[in-house]
Amino acid sequence: MKKNSLFSTLARGLAALAVLAAALAAQPVDDTQLKQVIIFGRHSVRSPVTPTSTLNDFSVRAFPEFGIPVGYLTANGTTLENTLGGYYRLWLTNEKLLTGNDSADSALVYFRANVIERTIATAQAFAAGLLPAARVTVNYYGPLESDPLFDPVGAGVARLDQRMALAAVMGRLGGNPQALSSAYAPELALTRSVLFGYPASETPALATPAGKLDVTTIPFQFAVGGQSGWPVDPGGLMMVLAAVDPFLMEYAEGLPASDVGWGQLTAGGVSQLSRLTDLVLDLECRTPYLAKVQSSNLASHVVRSMVQAATGNAMTGALGNPTTKAIVLVASDVNVSGLAGLFHLDWLVPGYQADFCGPGGALVFQLRQSQSTGEYIVRASYVAQTLDQLRNRTALTLATPPASAPVFIPGCSVRNVTFDCPLAKFVAVARQVIDPESADRMN
């Protein structure tokens, strides 16, 4: 019996090894080498973009003060972005794209930020983490100028037909934007309960306190853009967005739990309310017409930069030069969402809603080359510190990285775990989605 048992155990073990060997053989071997990386991210943690005096009209309790100007990067935001830059330093040196010699590597990077304080400060903090022993120049336009990379309409590169923009958004809503109030009823109910300080489960809901504005009851009446700052005026949705925006930043900033929605919101509640932010970004940036007008120029520069790196030949409309190894672009969630909408990119990382742009999060495009065939491929991912990594100011290493998700590029990616896309095919897809009338070929 013992002899048979031994043979049976050995047989099972050999069978298991055979299954494992077959599984390993089925996994594609990654023989690619990283040649260039383009990191296109959102700024890190900032103060609310709406003045506290206005926010307090929406709630029965005063919003926490951040102690800095409206919309500015916080001190913690600087620290968090510096930490993130340090993580990319570890990754890129491990990939042998950078050498670890900051002085030499500084000639291989290109930084560009949008014109507002929080994006410039974010880029500078990231650069200090990526290359701590070097002085890195962050390129940006003047405060009264429009950078054509991030604001092609304001810079005159692209032309927005406002009536077409309104029609395109209304078409996605079946001509009835007020239907959003039922589609997002749980989020609106939670918003109201937090602002007015009662349990979301309470029925009937508390009456609107005297002297306070209930932002959840303002009609969702979309109109031609004007003073709203959006391509299409989102009506009451803009007020809802202003009211919920501080909660994410309160949590990520690390304010006491009693100050995060006045103690009524956990990370889960913060994430649920961010569905309202996602809604506005989806309509204003991912709507196909708006994505083409607002993001074609950026996409054109991204694609040209990859082709320049692959060919080694200088190319108009590319960023940096043929030897540039890392391109870091810092703007806002509207810009990241717009580029994603243009290429129909989606992602999902732990703790966030689908396609949400977390503070400091970025779309990362790797240009890699097969060492066996010489073919260049594009590998996309979305990388972001989780809400708790932000809140706890978690140290990042290769062993404890930020959250990351591979991104499938429709019409281009092949079926593997990293969704690789041949560069030639990526260029062909880009030609299909980019509107040449909304893009220039200049830096």
Image (cartoon, rainbow, N blue to C red):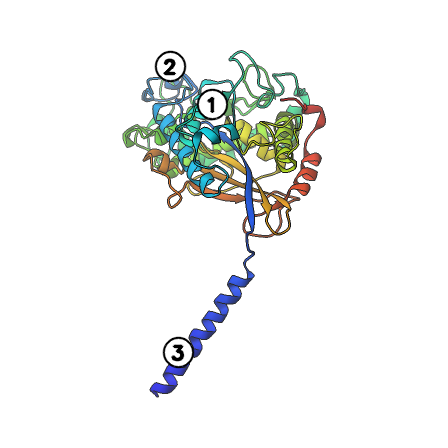
Sequence-wise first label, 2 or 1: 2
Instruction: Pinpoint residue 276: horizontal percent, then vertical percent.
Output: 48, 31
- Side of 168 relative to 379 (left or right): right
Callouts 2 and 1 close, C-beta under 8 Å: no
Amino acid bearing label 3 = Thr
Q: Which residue is mark 2?
A: 53
Foreground: 352 or 325? Answer: 325
In the rendered image, the quadrant that contains the C terminus is: top right
Amino acid bearing label 1 = Thr
User: Is 269 situated above or below 196?
Assistant: below
- Side of 49 relative to 65 (left or right): right
Distance from label 3 to label 1 (Cα)?
Answer: 61 Å
- Tell me which residue sits at (46%, 42%) in the image: 404
Q: Which is in the foreground here, disc 2 or disc 1? A: 1
- Tell me which residue sits at (38%, 27%) in the image: 77
Q: Which residue is mark 3?
A: 9
Which quarter of the picture shows residue 175? top right
Query: Label 3: how many residues lie within 10 Å, few (<14), some (14-19) or many (20+)?
Result: few
Instruction: Pinpoint residue 205: horizontal percent, then vertical percent.
Output: 38, 31
Query: Label 2: how many residues lie within 10 Å, few (<14), some (14-19) or many (20+)?
Result: few
Foreground: 344 or 52? Answer: 344
Callouts 2 and 3 close, C-beta under 8 Å: no
Mark 1 lies on a secondary structure that is: helix
Q: Which residue is mark 1?
A: 119
Mark 2 lies on a secondary structure that is: helix
Which quarter of the picture shows residue 6? bottom left
